[in-house]
Image: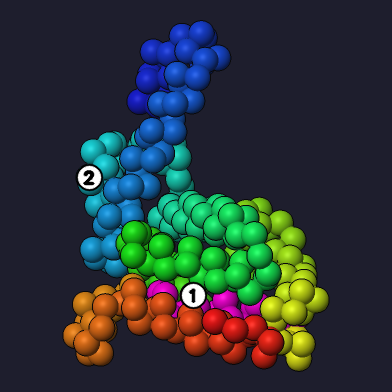
Amino acid sequence: MFEFVSRMATFSPETFNSGTYRSHRERQRRRILTASQELFDVRGIDRVTVAEIVSTAGIRASTLYEYFSNKDEIVWALVEDVMASGSDHAIRAMDSVRGPVLAKIGALFRAFEDELTEHPERVRFMAQFDAMYARDWTVERLLALEDKIIPGRMDGLADMVREGIADGSLRPDLDPDLTMHSILNAVIGAQRRLASLGSRVEEEYGQPIHLLFRESVHIILLGLRSTGIRD
């Protein structure tokens, strides 16, 4: 505590009221998160200690505890970052499409492929998180985070299916309250498995992971589309 108070004393009131101090805080926080994600990717979340994060980030333990009270908070902060980034990219991808809902869903899935190929470490992290979430954390905590990042996501997914049925691009027998949830679970599951296993999957099947993912998505899209839609 003395160290923290001493460090705060070095900042003038003008600094506190400017963006300089906020920028410093954000850089420190980002430094901790970056070090944590690198360690989690190499060694696994369960095996990494707070002391190792402190050492890798090149900070004092007291500095870390100014931002996070424990490792769980670091994990959840990373989850929020990954989900927010992925959501922004997916929304931009869908908004860029001028066409029927089936085309927008295709753009959404291409955003998942982009994440798999460009940021596999993020996808691997989320695969690790899934295992810990199933074991250690509540549904309510994840739902609260999802509501923060994507308010009204449940209604929005159902509305997308209804719109696709109305514009004739999706099969009329699809259940709006079930379809998008089901296919998103299937696509995300494939994405996280392929990222986690990486080269092992490529050696096993003799195909690069991005092509395996793309074909999985193609099959799902074929199952969604109306019989009146042609390639």
Marks 1 and 2 sit apart, C-alpha to C-alpha, by 33 Å
In percent of the image, x 34 and y 65: which residue is there? 117
Residue 181 on the magenta segment: yes
Look at the numbered disc 2 and give the secondary structure of its residue: helix
Q: Secondary structure at mark 1?
A: helix
Q: Position of residue 60 (x, y in %)?
A: 29, 36
Q: Residue at x 60, y 59 (%)?
A: 97
Q: Position of residue 224 (x, y in %)?
A: 63, 85
Q: Main secondary structure of the magenta part?
A: helix
For the residue pair 65 and 84, the one nearer the viewer reads as 84
Decide if residue 11 is on the left or right side of residue 164. Answer: left
Q: Are marks 1 and 2 in contact (CB under 8 Å)?
A: no
Type of the residue with mark 1: Ile
Q: Which color scheme did the rendering employ for the protein?
A: rainbow
Q: Which residue is mark 2?
A: 55
Q: In this view of the protein, which residue sits in the foreground, 103 or 85?
A: 103
Q: Quadrant of the N terminus?
A: top left
How many dots with numbers?
2
Q: Is 100 left or right of 35, judged from the image as shown?
A: right
At label 2, counting other C-alpha atoms closer than 10 Å, the crowd grade (few under 14, some 14-19, many 20 or more) is few
Magenta part of the protein: which range? 176-192
* Magenta stretch: includes residue 165: no
> Which amino acid lies under the numbered mark 2 shown in the image of this protein?
Ser
Question: Which residue is tagged 1?
Answer: 188
Taking the spot 24% from the left edge, 65% from the top edge, the residue there is 43
Q: Nearer the viewer, residue 88 or 52?
A: 88
Labels 1, 2: front one:
1
